[in-house]
Amino acid sequence: MLLKETKSLCPICRKVLDAEITEEDGKVWITRTCPDHGEAKNLYWSDAEMYRRFDAYEAIGAGVQNPQREAGPEACPGACGLCSNHHSGTLLANIDLTNRCNLNCDFCFANARACGFVYEPSFDEVIGMMAMLREEKPVPPPAVQFSGGEPTMRDDLPEIIWKAKEMGFSQVQIATNGIKLAKDINYVQELKDVGLSTVYLHFDGVTRETNPILPTSLKAVENCKEIGLGVVLVPTVINGRNDHEVGAILKYAAEHVEVVRGVNFQPVAFTGAASEDDIRRERVTIPDLADRIEEQTEGVIKKEFFYPVPCVIPISDLVEAYTGKPQVRFTTHQHCGAATYVFVEGDRLIPINEMVDVDKFFEAIDRMAVKMQHGGTINKYMSLLEGVKEMSASASKGEVNGTKLWKLLGEALVFQNFDALRDFHWNAIFIGTMHFMDNFNYDVERVQRCCIHYTTPDGRMIPFCTYNSGPVYREEVWKKFAQPLEKNE
């Protein structure tokens, strides 16, 4: 059964092709035919029912008011930076600080030894990239993540973080393997002191078989805990390699909730050389991951508890209507990611879905936003009070913390004081997954709705999945600014 038509790529020559997304045997497939390499049919989502449930949350954004270039409908994905075809602003900006790394993971798409050269923009070039991001309209990105390679291999990382905070990024993250953080707690303190918000820690498992640097990972978390610097665990999930440990990773996160703020699972994207057999054997989709989580938490965190990223759009609408100021909008494609929250009470995990009727909650928020869009300040305030009462009615069946959560949320909305809510969040764990695309499941519609953008020294913003697959802008950018390998070794 045909679900939609889109454009995709030939996985061999990367030519842009008309494609169909279809349902067959309860799964969703993407099919296209290259005139040179024939038909390619690849798995898109492994659960058609979940695919349709997420489809209900589709939210196409208006893009940015100051795109970097105008482009016709045939430009995607080969004419980036952000053009007039793009429908989403930047929620998270990525800046590759270097491609040098002190590991050599077989699934990594970024390291100097594999490239044969060093990519490492200068301090001034990094500042220029951040300045460009701050000019985005109507809302500049709230968060920047410094990645690589391994960003801690740069001696000027603290100065870069300091500058990012000074320039107005409320969230500053580093994506790291944790080696330097494990070795030197004073370095962790220095990063926190200059404004680092979150350590995005590569963390593939809780055993040596799945995580060869496990002692280093554990020590990095321990040092961050001692300093009070929040950590998000980031496992790359590969079927048959570490997918059997997703529940154990969540258990570890819950046991360290005072420092671990979330787990963001990333199903592997085949951005390098991969055979059809590799893909069939190792592919994990978002529904697959949700299945594993439900099974390995013994049904505590159910598959149905996960929602797509655009589900939070009503909250952006509400805050925008109440404040009169443009807000960041989570108009990511509904099939790019999924998320939920759990609260930790002793040795129990309590999903937020057990405390709240999530659908009714978002409906109440949406109605509140619509009411606020009409009338003056007093009417806005009255609509907010009425909405908070309606919203609190979505708190369910008297489960642990349900009443407390909505009391705090109501106070935060009414008085614009989020301190108590931050304290409550201290016992919560975000569980998310973002399935980045490769040439085998590439969907141009998803690219045009991407909210995670790379910045480049030549002044472009490029969607994540276009930067790392498809046209692979990463190779173009890195080679353009390459330095000889031997100078940095």
Image (cartoon, rainbow, N blue to C red):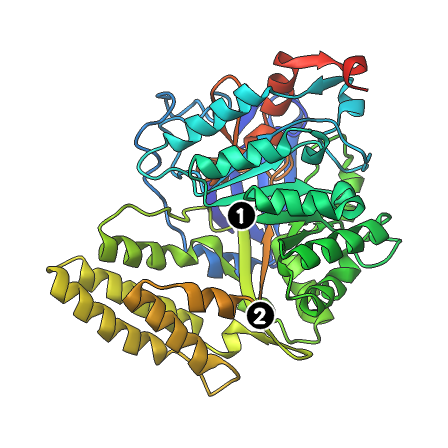
Residue found 65% across the figure and 66% down from its top: 257
Question: Is 3 left, or right, of 260 in this rendering?
Answer: left
Tell me where residue 288 appears, x and y as whole percent.
67, 58
Q: What amino acid type is highlighted by mark number 2?
A: Asn
**Rendered image quadrant of residue 410:** bottom left
Within 10 Å of disc 2 (Cα), the crowding (few <14, some 14-19, many 20+) is some
Within 10 Å of disc 1 (Cα), the crowding (few <14, some 14-19, many 20+) is some
Tell me where residue 396 appears, x and y as whole percent.
44, 82
CA–CA distance in space, label 1 to label 2: 27 Å
Q: What amino acid type is highlighted by mark number 1?
A: Cys
Q: Which residue is mark 1?
A: 336
Q: Which residue is mark 2?
A: 427
Please state which of residues 382 and 444 is positioned toward the viewer in this rendering.
382
Tell me where residue 307 appears, x and y as whole percent.
50, 61
**Rendered image quadrant of residue 87:** top left
SS at circle 2: loop
Residue 2, numbered circle = none
Residue 158 appears in the figure: yes
